Image (cartoon, coloured by chain):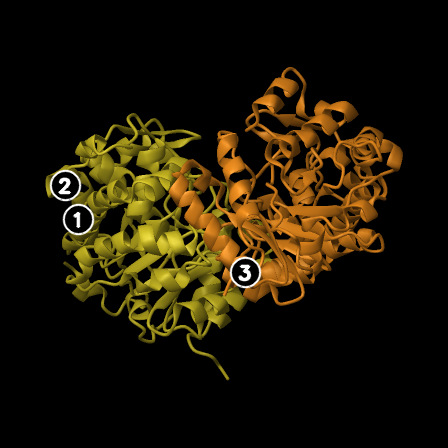
Chain colours: A orange, B yellow
Amino acid sequence: MRAGRTTDAPLIAAARGLVPRRTPVWFMRQAGRSLPEYRALREGTAMLDTCFDADLVAEITMQPVRRYGVDAAILFSDIVVPLRAVGVDVEIVAGVGPVVAEPIRTRKDLDALRALHESDVSPVLAAVAALTGPDGELGQTPLIGFAGAPFTLASYLVEGGPSRDHVHTKALMHSDPQLWFELCARLADIAGQFLRYQVLHGASAVQLFDSWAGALSRRDYERFVLPHSRVCLDQVRDLGVPMIHFGVGTGELLGSMATAGCDVVGVDFRVELTDAIARLGPDVAVQGNLDPALLFASRTAIEEAVGDILAAGRAAKGHIFNLGHGVLPETDPDALANVVELVHASPVTSVE
Amino acid sequence: MRAGRTTDAPLIAAARGLVPRRTPVWFMRQAGRSLPEYRALREGTAMLDTCFDADLVAEITMQPVRRYGVDAAILFSDIVVPLRAVGVDVEIVAGVGPVVAEPIRTRKDLDALRALHESDVSPVLAAVAALTGPDGELGQTPLIGFAGAPFTLASYLVEGGPSRDHVHTKALMHSDPQLWFELCARLADIAGQFLRYQVLHGASAVQLFDSWAGALSRRDYERFVLPHSRVCLDQVRDLGVPMIHFGVGTGELLGSMATAGCDVVGVDFRVELTDAIARLGPDVAVQGNLDPALLFASRTAIEEAVGDILAAGRAAKGHIFNLGHGVLPETDPDALANVVELVHASPVTSVE
């Protein structure tokens, strides 16, 4: 663990509700297709093969830190990495997303989901250790560990791939709650252990991605999803690193997500940050929430939007600047560099 | 106009805040792929050709009314019908959606959008008149007229097709607000006139679909979208029929949508109906909001969800039961029939 080296980092301070020396900024999917150096490196290597190659993971994770001077690296990985690691037959198909060969819909299917051992993800942890060790290139920049939340993992497994409507998943949770709970319990354990291993090898914070949570009503979220996300985060709690909890389209769920035992809740771009802060309450910091599509607008429009978000963020317990969703593949890297400059140039506290 | 014949219809009463004799229920996309009689009829005919064939439109519009005894028909049409009618080169490609041959991104491109004349949509209006006339099969069941809202139409035109991120559309509205306003003004006129013609030929209510509005922050919605939706509805106002305003993922926008000058706001399934009613205020009725994916769950789960929504709806000025989004193609028609029965069997007012 390297928490000591990054204790004063702006991201860690903001997550803990302390006043950072500058507003921290990083971008979801900052390591990825928008970077020419990423596209060059990935060429010819399948996504999941990349995620299990220690050198590639370390290099790709570093690329946006070098280019932008962001306040955190996020482990380059994929939501299905721990599933593949326990033996699930899953491939990432270009233009589609993760495709699961044998969807999980019966109690017997649960056998496919054994516990995750450290050795199952050795290359990933080697990359974490290399980046964050004494000679690691990250230095005092924190590395954020990464995992998909139980519901989002369950949706891929039950549907057999990405789904807009999550019909099989929702039918399962409502029609056979006991099976649903057993499925999510296994996934909470797998994802929680994956985060724990990352922290034990050097990550200074973690982010739990519940990409699809916004497809649920609050009632269903609280009954069928939140308890498992909480169990997942519980497995990291004693390690004392900040925990970020994020989903897309979660305006209705923010108050509930804040109770999962996290330090920071990520907010998508649909919610005004001021409203989000009110819903989250005073006990958690916020992360977000610039619309990634705005990076395609004029410099003036971007500057105005960034300024508004920074101003709103000052009312939060802490504010980590980010997009409200991942960087879009066609984004001009210079637009992101510009945002980093704007955020870093802004005063941390209100200048009234 | 046939408003007189349907004045006592439950849908019209609920929309006006009067006590209907039963809670009205209909389903977005009730006429469509989930019905075997629809699939049989559509076989071999392209979607937009169907929408411009008076006999097919009338027959498809009637199918769910016959099968389910729902409290309204909705005109079978497509969001891009009025665009095709003014000469835009748009096709509906199976598995993709509407594809526009020449996207609109410059001032010169606006020339493609002339005003909509009644003769441009003659077959559509013939279907409306046939259904709602003295010998029309609809009898006292109201027909809801249908149009896409300016923003959603604009997104198809600017992106050139369906888009998840609406990058070009958002960039345009932020970078060249004047061009954006001119584009939306033309679309508000086209969509508003399309609704007006439908009412003049016999529709008893209208629904404005802003399918993509949920992709916007409230700030952007209020600045760039709401004024145009209001202008669109303004063109129907003097005709005195109830106006329903609907979008998906609009939890943050409900309060704003209610100010567009509509009588009813449709609510998607992500928002608890109780919360939606509070955000909408006392002046508009609500429509919604069963999760269409729940129709794949057990009968018990469906019954519980329908009961919860009916109970919450009693606090509204008026409540039209509906799904929170369109019927999914794989839905079992019997599940919808069951919902209609449940809604019609429930007492209209609280039995305390």
Q: Say how many tags the image has.
A: 3
Residue B73 in sight here: no
Q: Locate residue A41, reporting x and y percent.
A: 65, 19
Q: Is residue A334 left or right of residue B298?
A: left
Neighbour class for label 1 at 10 Å: few (<14), some, many (≥20)? many
Q: Nearer the viewer, residue B121 or A323?
A: A323
- For label 3, the residue is A276
Kindly state the secondary structure of the residue where label 1 is placed.
helix
- For label 1, the residue is B193
* Three-letter amino acid code of the residue under disc 3: Ala
Marks 3 and 2, how far apart in space? Answer: 42 Å
Kindly state the secondary structure of the residue where label 2 is placed.
loop
Q: Is residue B335 left or right of residue B181?
A: right
Quadrant containing the N terminus of chain A is: top right
Marks 3 and 1, how far apart in space? Answer: 38 Å
Q: Relative to A46, is A146 above or below?
A: below
Q: Earlier in the sequence, mark 1 or mark 2?
A: 2
- The chain holding disc 3 is A
Q: Locate residue B191, reporting x and y percent.
A: 23, 47
Q: Locate residue A82, reporting x and y percent.
A: 77, 36
